[in-house]
Amino acid sequence: MKKLELKETLTNAGTKRPLSRFARRLSRAWQRLALPFDARVVVAVSGGADSTALLLAFDELIKAGRLALTLRVAHLDHELRGEAGAGDARFVAELAGALGYEVTIGRAAVGRRAAATRDNLEQAARRERYEFLGGVARGWGACAVAVAHTVEDQAETLLLALLRGSGARGLGGMRDRRPFDERGDELLLVRPLLQRARRAETSEYCAARGVRVRADEMNKDEQFARVRVRRRLLPLLETFNPRAVETLARTAGLLRAEADALERLGGDLLAEACREGLSGAAAGRAENGAKGRRAADEKGSLANETDALEDAPPLSVEVLRGADAAVLSYALRGWIKSGRGNLRRIEATHIAAVAGLLDGVRGGRVAELPGGARVERRRGLLLFRAGTAGAGKG
Amino acid sequence: MKKLELKETLTNAGTKRPLSRFARRLSRAWQRLALPFDARVVVAVSGGADSTALLLAFDELIKAGRLALTLRVAHLDHELRGEAGAGDARFVAELAGALGYEVTIGRAAVGRRAAATRDNLEQAARRERYEFLGGVARGWGACAVAVAHTVEDQAETLLLALLRGSGARGLGGMRDRRPFDERGDELLLVRPLLQRARRAETSEYCAARGVRVRADEMNKDEQFARVRVRRRLLPLLETFNPRAVETLARTAGLLRAEADALERLGGDLLAEACREGLSGAAAGRAENGAKGRRAADEKGSLANETDALEDAPPLSVEVLRGADAAVLSYALRGWIKSGRGNLRRIEATHIAAVAGLLDGVRGGRVAELPGGARVERRRGLLLFRAGTAGAGKG
């Protein structure tokens, strides 16, 4: 196999030269994240400066004996960039080989999944990429997937969320460590560069290691909102506050902590409303058992309720009414997510409409949700109706 | 007294022409705010479009019999704008007179209170203005002071807070109804235009009522961050999202609700930590009573504690340790505010330093606060030390 000719600085990473500052910071971040010294880690490498720097810094630490990770490099060619894309894949494969790590290159025709706008394309590419990374990691028995998001990414993510409109939950930043997805296994997603590393430093580090990274043309395409945020909005914000990037990233972290607290409290409220709701529903059924014709109607409804009961049980209106508006929002979102499987297309207005059912004393009212599901208020309970069969989940 | 010549549209507001849309929206906002139909209200009028529109719309509603408010117009000449400022005051006085309302014009030499920067000048002017308005309202027995902040003001306030760096509390928007200040009486501050009214509409409405408003030269002075936000940042954001202003204002409202929930939870946590803390401190004193020399030392400390006890009682470390990070921050902020009198110059880093005292098992550690106060961890308690006499409060 033909090896890439690399500068001496790259292959001599194992000699007794002092560790670079960039690598030392990565080492500290790894410790702060409480990750094993000898973990099996998939590193997602696009070929751009951030992810290449992450790989090179892991490599520096491994060859200096500061970490004993087993790495596998993973790269997904989205087939959006034609020849350039194929060139990225080759670069990543050769770099991995030169450093001595196994590599998995994937290909996915993201462009063919019709995407309505450029930003939808970005989201579709992201979903493909994460499916790919999860597959590689699980197939290989990795404990974590490492991605190279930096402080700038955190700031840009916040600005994009702000432009879309969100509470703390949407504005809260990316986490530096979290479960990879909702599959419930132990696989982690980690972002060791997120707290401290700046984009200028990743470029610098790659250059210092003698590696010429790939240019990502998509990063110049101003049809992407993220690119306009980076090239136009952030520079303007820096005229107000030269430390805008760090400030925004810090705010994203604060909001994330606040959203987490509210999420937890929302969960507590939901549990309480379920407990009271189930006893209320049971009482309702007992009462109706005694009434002839209405009982037949109710039985039909109760049969419908039974499906929902497992995922989104009836909630006590009284319990919910006493709650803080913000905590209530989080509780309802969690409940709707259980009933529907996800929160796609659910906006603040839908949550507000459901919360509105709690006002006043009248039952029999309904709030419609996108996709056919709806929420009814009846007999002091909020009831989740999945709508047409199967429309609830998915 | 010489009356201002006003167009017929102004003086005929009481005739049976249909209400303007702007006035109808104000009427609905007044109801939503649950304010009395016949309240006694001080309206703060600068002479600019927003506050002039607010006054004229109240006037339209009163003369059409839709509201029976008793209005007093209030205007503070900050003496920052020389002749133009005096002209503003004359305009407001004449307008009030022409409409038939009493008016109080104040003068305050804000410029002479040395302000380090233009933005500090803006804040000093704001404080003067609110002191003035509170004085007028209380002297006259008003139930509320009405100010004319619009949706744009809400969006701009959020952006300025974002640039400074904040969690939900700092980013949360202005409220449309709140106690005027912390004096604990019933006086309210209300912003009836905040939820719906746009700056373009206020200008339009004044023109429709035949009133030519005063131009505020300070609104063109780009040395003020707020002016740069308005003239440069908002227009750029609108290229991303044409509805940026409404989106940001809505986010400010969501974050405000979230901050309120966390504030309340922080208060609950603080109360619990105080309860456990007081019994812990009492237990400590009982224990120390039995020990000779150390008791003398402790007595000295306890004497210090007694002062703090009234404002910022000892807190149980154990209770605080179990809490959510975000709720803990709010609890500590509330505690420090009680001990110190306010939170001026207190940053997230100070709160984090105090929270850091909760880590590990070692006592005897200290976190310094700006202004001389500090927080000590001793015997399973957090203790607030006011520092040099009088440095704590103020």
Image (spheres, coloured by chain):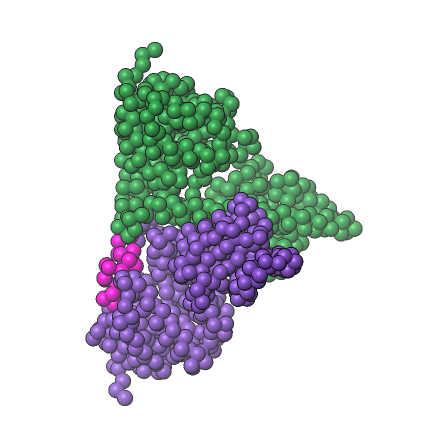
Chain colours: A purple, B green
- Whether residue A65 is situated above or below residue B26 in the rendered picture: below
- Whether residue A141 is situated above or below residue B316 in the rendered picture: below
List x then y, in percent, for residue A17. 37, 74
* Depth check, front residue: B121 or A261: A261
Residue extent of the magenta highlight: A216-233
Residue for point 54% across, 61% down:
A301
Residue for point 34% across, 59% down:
A152
* Depth check, front residue: A354 or A374: A374
Numbered marks: total: 0
Q: Residue furthest bottom?
A: A1
Q: In this view, does B196 lie to the left or right of B179?
A: left
The image quadrant of residue A255 is bottom left
Q: Magenta segment: does it hold B44?
A: no
Q: In which quarter of the image is the N terminus of chain B?
A: top left
List x then y, in percent, for residue A328. 52, 52
List x then y, in percent, for residue A201. 33, 64
Residue B251 seen by the camera: yes
Q: Magenta segment: does it hold A231?
A: yes
Q: In this view, does A143 lie to the left or right of B332?
A: left
* Depth check, front residue: B122 or A22: B122
Q: Is the magenta stretch mostly helix, strand or loop?
A: helix
- Whether residue B209 is situated above or below residue B329 in the rendered picture: above
Q: In this view, does A84 lie to the left or right of A155?
A: left
Residue for point 34% across, 22% down:
B15
* Depth check, front residue: B253 or B18: B18
List x then y, in percent, for residue A74. 35, 77
